[in-house]
Image (cartoon, helix red, strand yellow):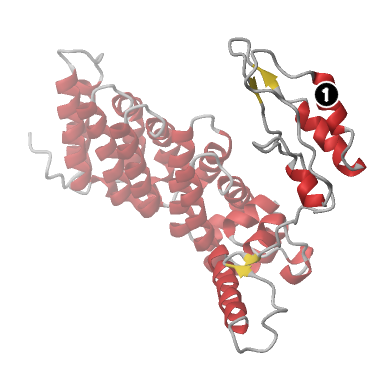
Amino acid sequence: MDYTKCDKASDFEAKFRTILAKLDVVEGEETWQQIDTALKNLTSLVKAGVTKFDTFVPTMKQAAKFINSSVLSERTRLSASGLTLVEELARQMETRFHPLSDLLFPSVMKTCGRANKVFVTRGVNCLTTVITYAHIPEQTPQICNAAMSDPSKTVRSSAAKLLMSIVSCCTVPELTPHLALVEKAIAGGVVDANPDARTTTRQTYEIYVKRFSSRVEQFHAGLSATAKKYLKIEDKSSGSNSNRPQSQFAAFRQRQPLRDRISAQRANAKAANSNGAPGSSGAGDAPATTATGPQRPRPVRPMGRAGPAAIRRDGTSALAASTGAAAVPLTLNSTSTKPSDPAAVVAAATTLEPPAMAAKINSLENVLMSPRSAKPTLARLF
């Protein structure tokens, strides 16, 4: 039987009954190819122009449940044949496809949330073709609800693409009754957690602004601050940017870069060095500078405090010589096997000047006697 030609309604009904009998079987390993062939024959009939007959829509409603079963099949070939039939119906019927959209649209929409990306891509392409040719504005609420509230990110992303097709293809009179829901879907889609959904919704918003410019201001007034940020809409209610307090990060960005600051410091250092050269005026008054700025003078240890006294080899005190006091020899007999009398050493120290006496006593406290040697060991206090 040739399914590529059909000129009469009676011929169509006869061929359709044959196809319907092959579709009315349970899908299995032995029957799925029979169902696939029947779907392809029905697609050929649609391409032949049978949609012009008045009995076509009531007749196709009889096969709707079999088409839906094939679209939702786990077999990719069988599902592809069902989706191809739906696309061809929309191409041939255009706006007359509306009576069949309520029967076929939900099953195709389910394929947009499948785990397999092949099914998702085919389902989105199928519905995009249907919307392009048939418009189906009556399905706008279902698409908007899926884009806003479906828990699956795959479904939300697919619904965002279908919403863009709806806004692009439907006429203004067709879409006007659903504009409030479309605006709500756009406002929720631009802040969606899925980046693909956000990107597609921003594109939908650009199309919406061009086609419905009279509603743009009203739409902007109802957007949240986050949605305005993603859509790059200036918030007029908060005033101009010059009156807004700057954040700490903005103030930090306005600081001079570190490289420029270091370059300026080096230039100042070179200028200071050139001013301090011999023969220039004010050379003695210019403070020392480095690459990082002026250098602080090092603190000077006060000289008024008496330092520790040192004992010379001849037994005299170095501190006494520096202060002008008479040198007092220390009677330490280095040749004897016993150390000198400590009382004699202390008595000699008492003859020094009062400022140096304490230093002399402190130095004598560091006299160490070696336990193994009979010779005394004198240590200098630092």
Residue 55 is at least partly visible in this image:
no
Placement of 349 over or under 46, stated as above or below = above
Residue drawn at the location 69% of the way across and 73% of the way down: 287
Looking at the rendered image, the quarter that the N terminus falls into is: top left
Q: Is residue 114 left or right of residue 216?
A: left
The quarter holding residue 273 reads bottom right
Count of numbered tags = 1
- Please identify the residue farthest to the left as the structure is shown: 1
| In the image: residue 161, left or right of residue 279 | left
Q: Which residue is mark 1?
A: 344
Q: Nearer the viewer, residue 55 or 72?
A: 72
Residue 162: x and y, percent? 44, 46
Q: Would residue 141 appear left or right of 21 to someone viewing this image?
A: right
Query: Is residue 268 visible from the viewing direction of this image?
Result: yes
The residue sitting at 54% across, 39% down in the picture is 193
Q: Residue lying furthest right in this view?
A: 354
The amino acid at mark 1 is Ala
Percent x, y of residue 263: 54, 71
Residue 296, horizontal then vertical, whole percent = 70, 62
